[in-house]
Image: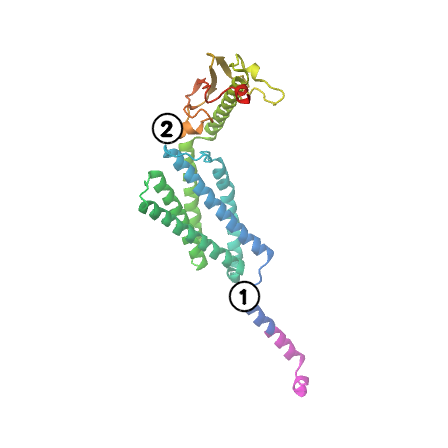
């Protein structure tokens, strides 16, 4: 054996080393090659951007459906008709998704073995699993509502279809990508179609809910309602303490409790207040827009104040006054309670 090794020339050793390195390189390529930090964060960024766009799109569609088909017999206190956040998420994350995807596929074109790295396959399989679970859960919800005898409203059907279509699209795209069936033209087609659908969803959102200017005016009106509710609460507390309705808002000022009289955040003007009787008063404000769903139960609940369930804060555009009458049985004087 030693004689055999001694008889080998330096060229033989060099050839053996080269063969070993070639064999090792071939094995690395079969395993997808080495995963660099750049590979990891590029693929992670693509998946995060994809999830952000998908969640924002579903959120946007749900909010549009809630406004277009309001539920008058139900009200979710935490729901919001504003589409600003989902639209902002789509505007920022969809271009990020496109740019990161371009970087990733350029790497694939230079190094096809990168398609087999573990981080890509794990993230794609995870996304495939999540999309499949969402699809199954969506169908289970639909069947459950049907079997349970619940009313399948238009809003509910549209929400189920929205989730079904979005999840199915993600499932189909990821499955094709995992099977390496997406060439450059197919990826470009997917990007164009998705981009057009996102733009259509955003346009539909603004057409149903209103432009950013309309949203700003609605927030002003919401703040005015909140201010009037605060004034109303202070008037009731004042009556409970002194058994009389204040004649002006100045009487409500209390430096100890740090209560200050709110003013119109849009104009800076004071709200109108007038005492109309021994137990009644009137508060007024100027509104930019009529309240949504006027006359519906949800609108009445939206602006309900504890103790004033029979009252609501529905309003038209322009000057609107709200007359309130204090019920002494519901709001007994505090001095009477302390005896």
Q: Residue at horizontal 60%, vertical 71%?
A: 21
Please state the extent of the stretch shown in magenta in the rendering.
1-19
Question: How far across and how far down the image is residue 40, in percent?
Answer: 57, 55
Q: Place residue 209 in its image quadrant.
A: top left
Residue 2 visible at all: yes
The answer to whether 129 appears left or right of 10 in the picture is left
Q: Main secondary structure of the magenta part?
A: helix
Residue 15 is one of the magenta-drawn residues: yes
Residue sitting nearer the eye, 69 or 205 = 69
Q: Secondary structure at mark 2?
A: loop
Real-space CA distance between mark 1 and mark 2, rounded to the nearest whole angstrom: 65 Å
The color scheme shown is rainbow
Decide: few, some or many residues near mark 2? Use Cα within 10 Å; few <14, some 14-19, many ≥20.
some
Q: Secondary structure at mark 1?
A: helix
Tell me, yes or no, if residue 267 can be seen here: no
Residue 290 place in picture, x, y as percent: 41, 23
Q: Quadrant of the C terminus?
A: top right
- Residue 107 occupies which quadrant of the picture? bottom right
- Locate residue 229, reporting x and y percent: 49, 23
Q: Which residue corresponds to the image point at 51% horizontal and 44% vertical from the top-left? A: 93
Identify the residue position indicated by label 1 in the image.
29
In the rendered image, residue 194, in percent from the top left (x then y), is placed at 42, 46
Q: Classify mark 1: residues with Cα within 10 Å, few (<14), some (14-19) or many (20+).
A: some
The residue to which callout 2 is attached is: 296
N-terminal label among 1 and 2: 1
């Amino acid at each position: 054996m030693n004689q055999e090794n001694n008889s080998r020339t330096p060229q033989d050793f060099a050839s053996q080393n080269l063969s070993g390195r070639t064999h090792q390189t071939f094995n690395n390529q079969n395993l997808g090659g080495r995963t660099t930090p750049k590979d990891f964060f590029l693929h992670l960024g693509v998946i995060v951007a994809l999830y952000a766009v998908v969640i924002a799109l579903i959120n946007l569609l749900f909010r549009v459906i809630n406004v277009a088909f309001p539920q008058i017999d139900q009200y979710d206190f935490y729901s919001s008709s504003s589409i600003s956040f989902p639209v902002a998420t789509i505007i920022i994350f969809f271009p990020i998704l496109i740019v990161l995807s371009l970087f990733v596929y350029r790497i694939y074109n230079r190094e096809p073995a990168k398609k087999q790295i573990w981080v890509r396959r794990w993230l794609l399989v995870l996304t495939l699993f999540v999309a499949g679970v969402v699809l199954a859960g969506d169908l289970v919800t639909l069947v459950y509502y049907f079997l349970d005898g619940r009313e399948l409203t238009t809003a509910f059907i549209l929400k189920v279809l929205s989730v079904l279509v979005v999840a199915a699209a993600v499932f189909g795209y990821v499955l094709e990508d995992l099977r390496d069936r997406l060439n450059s033209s197919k990826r470009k087609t997917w990007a164009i179609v998705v981009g057009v659908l996102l733009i259509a969803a955003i346009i539909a959102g603004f057409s149903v809910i209103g432009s950013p200017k309309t949203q700003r005016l609605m927030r002003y009106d919401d703040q005015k309602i909140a201010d009037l509710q605060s004034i109303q609460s202070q008037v009731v507390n004042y009556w409970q303490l002194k058994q009389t309705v204040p004649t002006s808002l100045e009487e409500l000022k209390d430096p100890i409790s740090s209560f200050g009289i709110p003013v119109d955040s849009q104009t800076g003007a004071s709200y109108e207040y007038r005492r109309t009787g021994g137990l009644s008063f009137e508060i007024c404000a100027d509104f930019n827009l009529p309240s949504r769903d006027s006359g519906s139960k949800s609108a009445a609940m939206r602006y309900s104040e504890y103790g004033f369930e029979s009252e609501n804060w529905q309003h038209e555009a322009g000057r609107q006054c709200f007359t309130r009458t204090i019920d002494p049985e519901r709001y007994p004087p505090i001095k009477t309670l302390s005896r």
